[in-house]
Amino acid sequence: MIKKRRKFNKKQKNSRYSSLSLFQKPDTNFFKPCPLSGKNAPILNYKNIKLLKRYISESGRILPSRITSVSLKKQKELSRSIKRARLLALL
Amino acid sequence: MNCYEHTFIAKQDLPSSQTKTLVNKYEDIIKKNSGKVLKTEEWGLRNLSHIIKNNKKGFYFHIKFEGIGTTIKELEKAGNIDEMLIRYLTVKVKKHNLEENFFEKKDYLENR
């Protein structure tokens, strides 16, 4: 019985999250700026296939903005231009 | 006057001599209906990403022009009837970008 308890205690100490409290703020910043807005932003267009291919999945679906961190305004433009490119069989 | 872009896909079995007549036909429609052609682009023969009406490849043509509502109406009327076309798309734009061509063919042979 004693041996078993020791093993259990050891495991808890070794785990990475044992020292992290629930209410502690994480060290890394999760915020990413929008890649399509701001200065030097690429041209968003139904003809710019190279750019649009970055924002669709392997099966051809549009990626959600929470993954790509595209702003709401640009995401609307992006989805519109992807749908136009699909109509012309470019994507 | 508004700015528009008209793209259409012609069938693969279109003879090369007939490509110019096809483009001229649509340019004439624009000119007749109070429009003004600014630039025409040929994107050449491209693979379609999915099969449309049993076609795997198609010739792409792109016309940038200024016009009014009736210009578009006549263009799309002609596009619906035409048997040589697979599909077309007309888009209204705020400002024309006449310099950049996303489908420009680079001549690798010349640079060798």
Image (spheres, coloured by chain):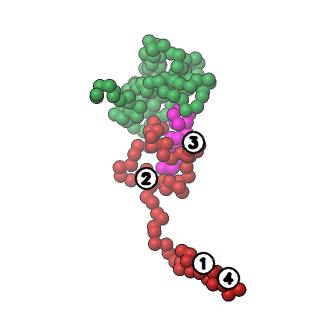
Q: Nearer the viewer, residue B43 or B71?
A: B43
- In the rendered image, what is the letter of the chain coloured red? A
- Judge whether A54 appears above or below B105 on screen: below
Q: Earlier in the sequence, mark 1 or mark 4?
A: 4
The extreme right residue here reads A1
Tell me how far mark 1 sits from mark 4, CA to CA.
11 Å
The x and y percentages for residue A48 are 44, 39
Q: Nearer the viewer, residue A86 or B73?
A: A86
SS type, badge 4:
helix
* Residue at x-position 33% and y-position 28%: B108
Per the rendered image, the range of residues in magenta is: A72-91
Q: Which mark is residue A60?
A: 3
Q: Chain of mark 3?
A: A
Q: Which residue type does callout 3 highlight?
A: Gly
Foreground: disc 3 or disc 2 = 3
| Badges 2 and 1, same chain | yes
Foreground: disc 2 or disc 4 = 4
Q: Which residue type does callout 1 highlight?
A: Lys
SS type, badge 3:
loop
Q: Which residue type does callout 4 highlight?
A: Lys
The majority secondary structure of the magenta stretch comes to helix
Foreground: disc 4 or disc 3 = 4
SS type, badge 2:
loop
Foreground: disc 2 or disc 1 = 1
Q: Earlier in the sequence, mark 1 or mark 3?
A: 1
Q: Which mark is residue A4?
A: 4
Residue B69 can be seen in this image: no
Tell me how far mark 2 sits from mark 1, CA to CA.
42 Å
Tell me how far mark 3 sits from mark 2, CA to CA.
20 Å
Q: Which residue is mark 1?
A: A11
The x and y percentages for residue A50 are 45, 40
* Residue at x-position 51% and y-position 28%: B47
